Image (cartoon, rainbow, N blue to C red):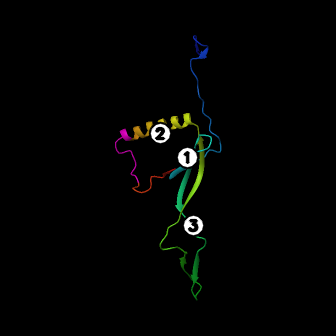
Amino acid sequence: MDKNDDNNLPGKIRYEYQQDPDTRIQYAHGVWGGINPQGEIEVSFYLESDKMPPYSERLVAPDGSFGHEIVPHDEEMRTVTRTIHSRVILNYHTARAVLEWLQDKLDMLDMEEGSAPLIYEGDSGIEQ
């Protein structure tokens, strides 16, 4: 390793990456979080889906054939389930580094004409 003569520090640091065998890819529709009492940023990534009904039923005709499926639902309200699949706690310096990294990646996408995906005009998926 190269040495820096002024202060006996290495001239370079190598980071080698190893992936945990339990690593899974997670898709996120949004994020929820805030600053905890220790001054760290807590981020919870979630996936949204329609809430599963508590049950469904099928009518049975006199000849034994099945009719259509009946699912209870409220005509005036739609329920969406947000399943939090990952929580990440970041200190200030790491949060700044993640912010800069994300900004760099977004800038790269912005420079590539037509590469940015279409956006949903509703909820941004970011909450506090």
Tell me the quarter of the picture where residue 38 sits.
top right
Residue 27 shows up from this direction: no
- Front in this rendered view, residue 46 or 64: 46
Labels 2 and 1 touching (C-beta < 8 A): no
Question: Label 2: which residue?
Answer: 102
Depth check, mark 2 against mark 1: the one in front is: 1
Question: Label 3: which residue?
Answer: 52
- Looking at the image, which residue is at 44% across and 38% down? 103
Magenta span covers which residues?
A: 110-119
Q: Position of residue 84 (x, y in %)?
A: 59, 53
Q: Earlier in the sequence, mark 2 or mark 1?
A: 1
Secondary element at image label 1: strand
Q: What is the CA distance from the residue labelled 2 to the residue labelled 1?
A: 18 Å
* Residue 56 horizontal side relative to residue 99, left or right: right
Q: What is the CA distance from the residue labelled 1 to the residue labelled 3?
A: 29 Å
- Front in this rendered view, residue 39 or 122: 39
Q: Amino acid at mark 2?
A: Leu
- Front in this rendered view, residue 61 or 30: 30
Question: Label 1: which residue?
Answer: 34
Q: How many marks?
A: 3
Q: Earlier in the sequence, mark 3 or mark 2?
A: 3
| Residue 96 drawn above or below residue 35 | above
